Image (cartoon, coloured by chain):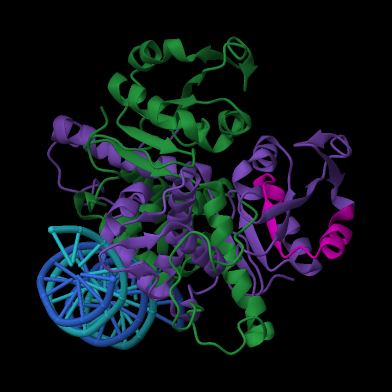
Chain colours: A purple, B green, C cyan, D blue
Amino acid sequence: MATGRTHRPATRSRGIPEATVARLPLYLRALTALSERSVPTVSSEELAVAAGVNSAKLRKDFSYLGSYGTRGVGYDVEYLVYQISRELGLTQDWPVVIVGIGNLGAALANYGGFASRGFRVAALIDADPEMAGKPVAGMPVQHTDELERIISDNGVSIGVIATPAGGAQQVCERLVAAGVTSILNFAPTVLTVPDGVDVRKVDLSIELQILAFHEQRKAGEEAAAAAEAGAPPPVRATGATRKGPDGDVPAVMPA
Amino acid sequence: MATGRTHRPATRSRGIPEATVARLPLYLRALTALSERSVPTVSSEELAVAAGVNSAKLRKDFSYLGSYGTRGVGYDVEYLVYQISRELGLTQDWPVVIVGIGNLGAALANYGGFASRGFRVAALIDADPEMAGKPVAGMPVQHTDELERIISDNGVSIGVIATPAGGAQQVCERLVAAGVTSILNFAPTVLTVPDGVDVRKVDLSIELQILAFHEQRKAGEEAAAAAEAGAPPPVRATGATRKGPDGDVPAVMPA
DNA sequence: ACCTGTGAAAAAATTCACAGCC
DNA sequence: GGCTGTGAATTTTTTCACAGGT
């Protein structure tokens, strides 16, 4: 099982660029906030600031959806909220299951951002029999044995995996076999899925690593060549070989 | 306070493209797994599969770091682990603080992926006096009053914000004022920071919304023009105006 | 006077395809 | 024969800048 490629090839769905799709939730969030403050209209510049992008990009993004603004005025907040919601498919109700109710799974179950955007947590599933029946976020945790039945009874097409890395692929396969076609993966593993199944991943430590990269660079601007002792970019041993997993490979991370 | 731009302008640090930096943690994870299985060398193709990318991209990415492979053979796993770790700044120890110890904060505190990659959780901070002293992940939660002292005592330069959206900006400003220059934001808000401070965000619901978009598209392939009754892309009322937040704007989401 | 929508230009990222080395 | 490293080609994304509408 699970033969197909990993990840889909970033298809440009319905002509809306993937990069734009990825920003629509950002705009939606900013617009929802404006809507709650009963702001009737907003300019591309204002909305761009609120969403943390620049206005040219925002206007270009919106241009893929249609002409929803009014020149000289801006965008009608309510109307735009609706259009983006519709485009994202959030005007319908998506039942999701969360598999793996550890700290993270519980956090997700309690996370308001799901419920408020068309996602309904249909069930919480965990492999630990101890967890079964325990209420999390006002909902009893169910055992993995029930997985297939739950998926099918609730017409679930989106699954969230928050298990340890080890169990993720197996859970993924069961979800897919039961009919799930979109998976949000929080486990730090690459999932292999058949064609036609979407996987998106969130790795909590990846963003931190990217920050460390930039942080190091900031520090390096002062400390400069102190550590690297004047040698150009690659530290690689000057002429000597450096093959084996032993030898002169410098002491690696904590491990 | 907090005057500067939002987000940094995606600087191409030291000539390594941002897109490449974002994938280095992926490669590192795959390599670490190989290393644990004592695999000595790996080809770009094998590693690409393990990391979930294609091999041309991987080779191009590595080419920015230097020539760390051997033609006809592949890459030395240990050596590459070290090189990528070094490039990402993970050979040094980064003390981080986590602010906001709710479900998510606790999940982060317990998340092994931090500790195993050069990040050390120096403190857990929460605004709730009830939480103070409670142990989470084997560590007593400290009160927000201590924030500045903790940052300074531990030389913390990376902060993780896992508070509700409302408190995030204020926490952010205190972190920055205390000397933090990189922030990982889990709160669903755009943070405004001065120049020179990096912010990266993880929004748990954004990925889900992107999945919904694709999921809807899959469903739409069969259901097709059933809902949209043959009209081309924009549904906008044919000629009539559609201004006010009332009128013919179709009933909006759950809200 | 203001602001959108968008062609066109520029920049960035990805993919191709193959020379060069093991 | 196998695999890396990389210029060149291609595609995608971002940015510019302004025509056109309110």
In this view of the protein, which residue sits in the foreground, B44 or B73? Answer: B44
Identified at 58% across, 90% down, the residue is B230
Give left or right: position of B194 versus A242.
left
x%, y% of residue B180? 32, 26
Looking at the picture, does residue B139 appear above or below residue A210? above
Identified at 44% across, 57% down, the residue is A77
x%, y% of residue B3? 23, 34
Q: Quadrant of residue C22?
A: bottom left
Identified at 73% across, 45% down, the residue is A100
Looking at the picture, does residue B236 appear above or below residue A73? below
Residue B93 in view in this figure: no
Looking at the picture, does residue B157 appear above or below residue A216? above
Is B187 magenta? The answer is no
| Circle count | 0
Residue B228 in view in this figure: yes
x%, y% of residue A94? 69, 61
Identified at 34% across, 53% down, the residue is A47
In this view of the protein, which residue sits in the foreground, B206 or D11? Answer: B206
In the rendered image, the quadrant that contains the N terminus of chain B is top left
Give left or right: position of B9 versus B230.
left
In this view of the protein, which residue sits in the foreground, A104 or B72? Answer: A104
In this view of the protein, which residue sits in the foreground, A191 or A233? Answer: A191
Looking at the picture, does residue B220 appear above or below residue A226? below
Work out which residue is located at the far bottom of the displayed protein and give it.
B230
x%, y% of residue A1? 74, 71
Is A154 magenta? The answer is yes
Residue stretch rendered in magenta on the structure? A146-168
